[in-house]
Image (cartoon, rainbow, N blue to C red):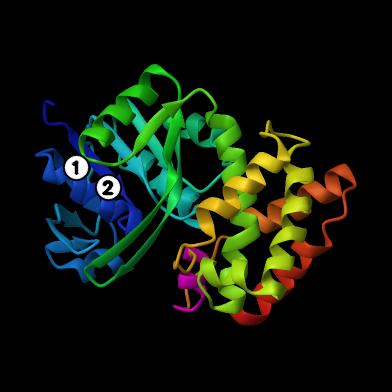
């Protein structure tokens, strides 16, 4: 594949992973980040395999054009990053947003005057200094089934990143939101990996209750696969993952968290559609306690 000029905005766990993999395939990659980028120091070990890390910058370039611009920030930083790209006049044919679940990017497309192609990731990431553990699931990464989606899939697959353009992408993105709401905050509240949540009777019962609420709320506004199929996949794919959620990693490191974008979203849907979502409200209360 011909080398591409690539900017990755938000060099956390996923940003560094994507950057190192694409750089390994000889692409011209620039990583824009802060704290985690400083910790890798030129190399990263992805599941114990060494990769060189591309050049990192702590100030976004100006008036540059790229073939691919990946936005890998957390949701609470998305507004800031989009406006930073606009102010610095970053140009390119393909903007990609790697965000967890359902994210309405229409307002950002108006700011950038470009469509943002979403990617949803069904994997876990944990970066500690320059050691990155990636715990995949069989679904892998998904993006939209479009010309640009296929281009993104092609460059990532060439770098051994399992991203596929999928005709069922919207359903899968909604499914990932259900999973996030069931597991991410609960992992933080218990300070335990996903595998523990499914084995412990108390937390497993909470997962079951959260699933029922989340599925009923999300299906009011988004297309979803059949309930029993999603639930089966969630249990099969996540029950053995010895992985602490990104929410858990963030909260116990004293950083912001994305819970309001997930369980908070379910609570908003509950109000809008008159659905009882008491278990999601309880999650928000528990998160506030440990975050404080």
Residue at image location 42% in from the left, 52% down from the top: 123
SS of the residue at dot 1? helix
> Is 36 displayed left or right of 273 in the figure?
left
Residue 292 visible to an observer of this rendering: no
The 10 Å Cα crowd at callout 2, few under 14, some 14 to 19, many 20 or more, is many
Residue 61 x %, y %: 22, 46
The 10 Å Cα crowd at callout 1, few under 14, some 14 to 19, many 20 or more, is many
Closer-to-camera residue (152/212): 212
Which numbered tag is attached to residue 18? 2
The quadrant of the rendering that contains the C terminus is bottom right
Q: Is residue 271 magenta?
A: no
Residue at image location 27% in from the left, 47% down from the top: 18
Residue 6 x %, y %: 22, 38
Closer-to-camera residue (88/230): 230
Question: Dividing the picture into quarters, in which one does residue 148 lie?
Answer: top left
Residue at image location 68% in from the left, 58% down from the top: 263
Q: What's drawn in magenta, residue-wise?
A: 246-253
The quadrant of the rendering that contains the N terminus is top left
Residue at image location 44% in from the left, 32% down from the top: 143
> Which residue is disc 1 drawn over?
22
Check if mark 1's residue and mark 2's residue have beta carbons within 8 Å. yes
Up the image or down, 211 lies above or below 105; here it is below
Specify the farthest residue to the right. 274
Question: Dividing the picture into quarters, in which one does residue 162 lie?
Answer: top left
Gap in Å between the C-alphas at discs 1 and 2?
Answer: 6 Å
Main secondary-structure element of the magenta-colored stretch: helix
Up the image or down, 69 lies above or below 193; here it is above
Residue 97 x %, y %: 42, 40
SS of the residue at dot 2? helix
């Amino acid at each position: 594949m011909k080398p591409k000029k690539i900017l990755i905005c938000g060099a956390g766990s996923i940003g560094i992973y994507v950057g190192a993999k694409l750089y390994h395939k000889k692409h011209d990659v620039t990583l824009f980040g802060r704290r985690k980028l400083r910790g890798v120091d030129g190399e990263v070990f992805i599941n114990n395999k060494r990769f060189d890390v591309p050049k990192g910058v702590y100030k976004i370039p100006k008036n540059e054009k790229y073939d691919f611009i990946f936005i890998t920030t957390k949701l609470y930083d998305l507004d800031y990053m989009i406006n930073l790209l606009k102010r610095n006049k970053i140009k390119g044919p393909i903007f990609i947003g790697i965000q967890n679940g359902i994210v309405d990017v229409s307002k950002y497309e108006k700011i950038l005057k470009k469509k943002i192609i979403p990617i949803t990731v069904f994997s876990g990431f944990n970066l500690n200094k320059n050691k990155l553990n990636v715990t995949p699931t069989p679904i892998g990464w998904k993006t939209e089934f479009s010309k640009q989606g296929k281009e993104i899939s092609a460059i990532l697959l060439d770098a051994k990143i399992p991203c596929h353009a999928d005709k069922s992408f919207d359903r899968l993105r909604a499914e990932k939101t259900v999973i996030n709401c069931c597991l991410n905050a609960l992992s933080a509240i218990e300070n335990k990996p996903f595998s523990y949540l499914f084995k412990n009777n108390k937390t497993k019962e909470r997962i079951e209750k959260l699933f029922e609420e989340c599925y009923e709320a999300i299906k009011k506004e988004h297309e979803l696969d059949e309930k029993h199929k999603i639930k089966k996949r969630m249990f099969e794919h996540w029950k053995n993952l010895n992985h602490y959620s990104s929410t858990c990693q963030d909260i116990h490191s004293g950083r912001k968290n994305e819970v309001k974008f997930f369980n908070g979203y379910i609570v908003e849907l509950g109000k809008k559609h008159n659905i009882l979502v008491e278990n999601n409200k309880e999650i928000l209360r528990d998160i506030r306690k440990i975050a404080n």
